[in-house]
Image: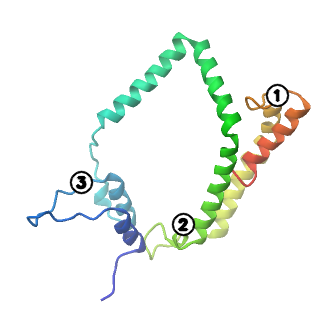
């Protein structure tokens, strides 16, 4: 007997926990996982799963986030200088003490994405098994290259080093100095090199 399930559906089965039967043989009611339903609809092509729903708001998450956001805005309105001083000091501390972590994390993510693409997970088709890609590989590469070069070389390729020369990252060097040239170029190369 052959399985008609797509590789995406098999992956979903591994990612979404299975329901277990209770001691009396009954199953607990299935919770509605909107993300799972959207993925399932995408992979199976079932349009009926896109019926409009009225999602419930998690009041705790919404409330805590709203209080923090409103509090931060009020702090900025009431004490602009205090907020600027504290946030500037915090940013300088993070850059001076953990700047190496940004470079290391960016390098790790580049290596991880290359590994992901080369591993068996890179062969998982995002769609039905018999579905053809919308664009050929050469077209995808051309589009990504054009978009990257368009925004990078035409504007930020020149503007970003000049911007960092005039206003270096906090805690690094004095603006418009010889050291600022090296810092500006290093920062621009970090942003537009292998670590986009």
**Residue, far right:** 178
Q: Secondary structure at mark 2?
A: loop
Residue that numbered label 1 is attached to: 166
Residue that numbered label 3 is attached to: 31
Tag in front: 2 or 3: 3
Task: State the residue in front, 173 or 53.
Answer: 173
Q: Is residue 44 visible?
A: no
* Residue 78 percent across, percent down from the top left: 52, 10
Give above or below for 85 relative to 124: above
Residue that numbered label 2 is attached to: 134
* Residue in the image at 30% along x and 54% along y: 33
For marks 1 and 2 on the same chain, the one whose residue lies earlier in the sequence: 2
How far apart in space, not on screen, are marks 2 and 3 (Cα)?
34 Å
**Residue, far front:** 97
Is the residue under label 3 in contact with that under label 2 (CB below 8 Å)? no
* Residue in the image at 23% along x and 63% along y: 19
* Residue in the image at 39% along x and 62% along y: 42
Tag in front: 1 or 2: 1
* Residue 45 percent across, percent down from the top left: 36, 66
Task: State the residue in front, 120 or 4.
Answer: 120
> Label 2 neighbourhood size at 10 Å, few (<14), some (14-19), many (20+)?
few
Q: Is residue 183 visible?
A: yes
**Residue, far bottom:** 1
Asked where in the image residue 69 lies, by quadrant, the reply is top left
- Which quadrant: the N terminus? bottom left
């Amino acid at each position: 007997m052959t399985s008609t399930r797509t590789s995406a559906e098999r992956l979903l089965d591994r990612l979404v926990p299975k329901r277990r039967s209770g001691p009396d043989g009954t199953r607990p009611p299935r919770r509605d996982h909107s993300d799972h339903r959207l993925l399932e609809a995408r992979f199976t092509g079932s349009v009926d799963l896109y019926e409009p729903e009225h999602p419930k708001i998690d009041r705790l998450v919404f409330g805590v986030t709203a209080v923090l956001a409103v509090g931060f805005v009020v702090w900025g309105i009431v004490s602009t200088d205090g907020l600027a001083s504290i946030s500037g000091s915090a940013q300088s501390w993070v850059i001076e003490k953990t700047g190496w972590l940004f470079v290391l994390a960016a390098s790790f993510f580049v290596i991880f994405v290359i590994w992901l693409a080369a591993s068996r997970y890179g062969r998982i088709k995002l769609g039905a098994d018999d579905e053809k890609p919308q664009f050929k590989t050469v077209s995808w590469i051309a589009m990504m290259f054009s978009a990257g070069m368009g925004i990078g070389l035409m504007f930020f390729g020149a503007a970003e080093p000049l911007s960092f020369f005039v206003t270096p990252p906090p805690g690094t060097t004095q603006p418009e100095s010889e050291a600022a040239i090296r810092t500006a170029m290093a920062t621009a190369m970090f942003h537009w090199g292998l670590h986009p």
